[in-house]
Image (cartoon, rainbow, N blue to C red):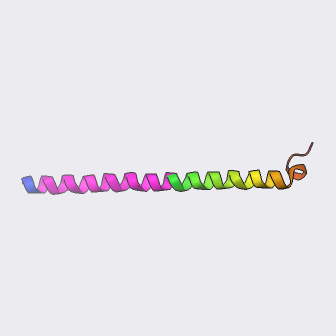
Amino acid sequence: MKILKVIVAAALCALVLSGCTLLAIADAAGSAVVYGVKTTVNVLDAVTPDIINKK
């Protein structure tokens, strides 16, 4: 019975840690996309300021 508890606890720990890893990877990927879009907008704004910023 004690072995079963240890196995269940180990399985739960593995699931929790893999979930945290997945969230960390998704967060990093999302941040990379956001900064990539910001960089693209800044480059387009620098290249064509009259089209984007109509004054």
Residue sitting at the far left: 1
Q: Quadrant of the N terminus?
A: bottom left
| Residue 22 part of the magenta segment | yes
Q: Is residue 29 left or right of residue 13?
A: right
| 19 horizontally vs 47: left or right | left
Which residue is at 89% across, 52% downward? 51
| Residue drawn at the location 68% of the way across and 54% of the way down | 37
Indicate whether residue 10 is drawn in magenta: yes
The single residue placed furthest to the right in the displayed view is: 55
Q: Quadrant of the C terminus?
A: top right
Is 2 placed left or right of 50 in the picture?
Answer: left
* Residue ID at (12%, 56%): 4
Front residue of 8/28: it is 28
Image label count: 0
Left or right relative to 38: residue 21: left
Outermost residue on the top side: it is 55
The percent coordinates of residue 29 (x first, y second) are 54, 56
Where residue 25 sits: x, y (%)?
A: 46, 56
The stretch of residues the image draws in magenta is: 4-27
Main SS, magenta region, reads helix
Residue at 42 percent of width and 56 percent of height: 22
Percent coordinates x, y for residue 18 in the rendering: 35, 56
Nearer the observer, 40 or 16: 40
